[in-house]
Image (cartoon, rainbow, N blue to C red):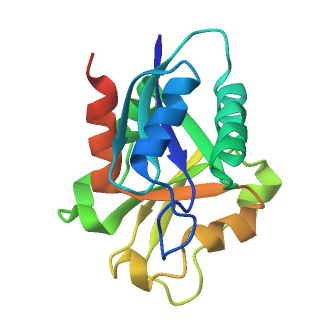
Amino acid sequence: MTKHVALLRGINVGGRTQIAMADLRGLFTALGCEAVQTYLRSGNVVFGAPAGQTPAELAARIGERIADDLGVSVTVLLRTAESLARTVARNPYLGREDDPAKLHVTFLAQEPTAEQAARLEVPAGETAVFTLAGDEIHLHVPDGYGRTRLDNAFIERRLGIPATTRNWRTVTALRELAARD
């Protein structure tokens, strides 16, 4: 079994795309996943999956099953426990910010091309900064995520790549859950 973290985009946020976490756990279990745990109500699932499928194949299966069983179309992004641990370890803003509420990670469905990456820049007048690292973007938003224009929708529009953003507390909590045996 390989430990994975599924990040579902837009679940139980703003009253749209409501999915009960018990239903989500049951769906993952029905797909043959083990030790399924959800974190919060925003589409974070830690689970073990049998070897033999790429993360992209597994994400597609999960997305199809959610659509078929729950009638909801969502973007599913997967990370292994190891890749999530690397995400936490390489956050370039840890040393400069004591408040984890100012740190976020945007997970991308794929690594952007050089051309796509060149389209991503901080909007004028923003204090936020970002670092693109493969298929993720580390964000430092001194004025708070709710006030920045460098949000998930902005990033998706600029890159043309599906994405989902998690705050630093959630990222580190998911890393801890995924590291457990």
Residue placed at 49% from the left, 62% from the top?
Answer: 130
66 left or right, relative to 161: left
Q: Residue furthest bottom?
A: 125
What is the x, y in percent for residue 19? 50, 56
Above or below, 28 against 43 in this view is above
Count every numbered label the image shows and give the total: 0
117 left or right, relative to 18: right
Toward the viewer: 170 or 65? 65
Residue placed at 20% from the left, 65% from the top?
Answer: 99
The answer to whether residue 36 is seen in the rendering is: yes
Toward the viewer: 35 or 89? 35
Residue placed at 34% from the left, 82% from the top?
Answer: 143
On-image quarter of the C terminus: top left
Q: Quadrant of residue 77?
A: top right
What is the x, y in percent for residue 3? 44, 21
What is the x, y in percent for residue 145? 40, 75
